[in-house]
Amino acid sequence: MNRSNTEQAGTEQAGAEQAGMGRLLWTIALPAMLTNLATALFGLADMWAIGRLGDAPAQGAVELGAKYMLGLLNVFNFLRTSTVALTAQGTGSGNRAAQGQTLARAMAVAVAIGALLLVAMPWSVPAGLDLLEAKGQLRAQAHAYIAIRYWAGPPWLANCVLVGWLIGRRQVRRVLVVEITANAAHIALDLLLVLVAHWGVAGVAIATVSSEALKFALLAAIVLRQPAARQAFAAIRHRDTWRRGALARLFALNRDLFARTLLLTVALLIFARSGAQAGPVTLAANAILFQLFMLSTLILDGFESAAQVLCGEALGSRDRRRFTATIRAGLLWGTLAGLLLTLAYALGGARLAAWFSTDAQVAGATGVYLGWIVVLPLAGVASFVLDGVFVGAGWTRAMLGTMLAAMALYVLLIWLLHPLGNHGLWAAFTLFFAARALGQFIVLPRLVRRGFSAS
């Protein structure tokens, strides 16, 4: 075979491998997207139900309360991401016992954090409302919402572990079924308690607590039927599960993910606080637009979940070629999905945003700032995909470093763009995600060389 034929054969083989990786990526990403869309219905259903009342302060209270709970709980999302990464790495290395030990350790951490949150409740709720500058009627309604929804915290933490463990084992479709079931119950309760029983913000909060408890029951039933989960019960009694080296690795991973998520949460709280300072109409408009942003984020997060699993498996099996193929496939398909979301919001975003409030002022304000929601999917998609790569490979310290740099830029832009009002706030938020992706691209080649240097 001459050189040109050899090169052509190599190109065809590489193309076939890339196509195969694309298909494998979608087998995880698509169910994860649908799962995330089901999750997004929590916020969308809440905002729609409370918006039917035509009460801007009530809608703003639900937004502030939801932001508080997002800020409180999302910093512990490391339970999900670290469980995905460690479970996938155990799968890639062929170590089944490690999967059970991962589940045992992660669930122990979730239970401990849940207990601490309940003890801190009398102090954390007033402090959070002070931080968000909630006052008067807005504060009273937000407090009523949080006082109920807070009890969804412990099952939410446990669900992070169970979902992460199932995703790490590529059982995303089972997670999807649970999410759809729980969200159907959530929507039904929203309609019943808010629009029929007229319980207002309390009805929205009760719907969330009830659906989170249902989700835990369903996930636990699925996990407990699997042999690896029974290994987790056995692992609790084994000294190896709690040896210093294994715990140190878990806590180092969780520490970096906690700090990274804390920074992201601070960015979201700064966003919410700045919107609250602009008045209830702008706050309600930002709440609606933020829900549309979260919708696009949860769709694109499917590629992050796929990258976590596939990069974790590739690193566990020391397969550099598969690792880089996963990165290329994730960025390619993620960018195409981001482009489709941008087009969808450009064509129908105004109509969709207006659907979430009957207040004419709120509906008008959403149209003024809608352009930022059109831009955000493309600005943020690379950072979502690369987050999955970094988490799956365990490069959490480097990911934290890029987050710190982007956060510093975000705070600076908030100050510099303040004269532009709410447009300046959205511009800073958009550039925050673009800066994160740029930092990750800069450090990625060095991390790949170091991670596979012994391969």
Image (cartoon, rainbow, N blue to C red):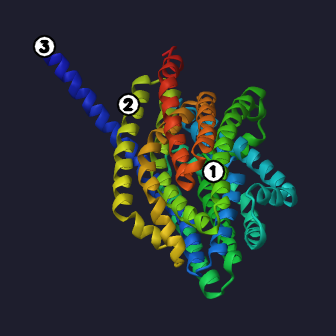
Nearest the camera: 370 or 299?
Answer: 370
Tell me if label 3 and label 1 are in contact, CB under 8 Å: no
Per the image, label 3 sits on a secondary structure element best described as loop
Quadrant of image for the N terminus: top left
Residue matched to label 3: 1
Instruction: Find the distance from the CA under tag 2 to the CA under tag 1.
Output: 33 Å
Q: Nearer the viewer, mark 2 or mark 1?
A: 1
Identified by mark 2, the residue type is Ala
Identified by mark 1, the residue type is Leu
Q: Nearer the viewer, mark 3 or mark 2?
A: 2
Residue at the (19%, 18%) spot, across then down: 7
Identified by mark 3, the residue type is Met
- The mark nearer the N terminus, 2 or 1, is 1
- The mark nearer the N terminus, 3 or 1, is 3
- Asked if 104 appears above or below 408 in the picture, the reply is below
Nearest the camera: 150 or 17?
Answer: 150
Residue matched to label 1: 268
Q: What is the x, y in percent for residue 273?
A: 68, 55
Q: Nearer the viewer, mark 3 or mark 1?
A: 1
Q: Residues within 10 Å of mark 3 (few under 14, many from 20)?
A: few
Mark sitting on residue 372: none
Residue at the (33%, 55%) spot, across then down: 343
Q: What is the x, y in percent for residue 387?
A: 53, 38
Res 172 visible: yes
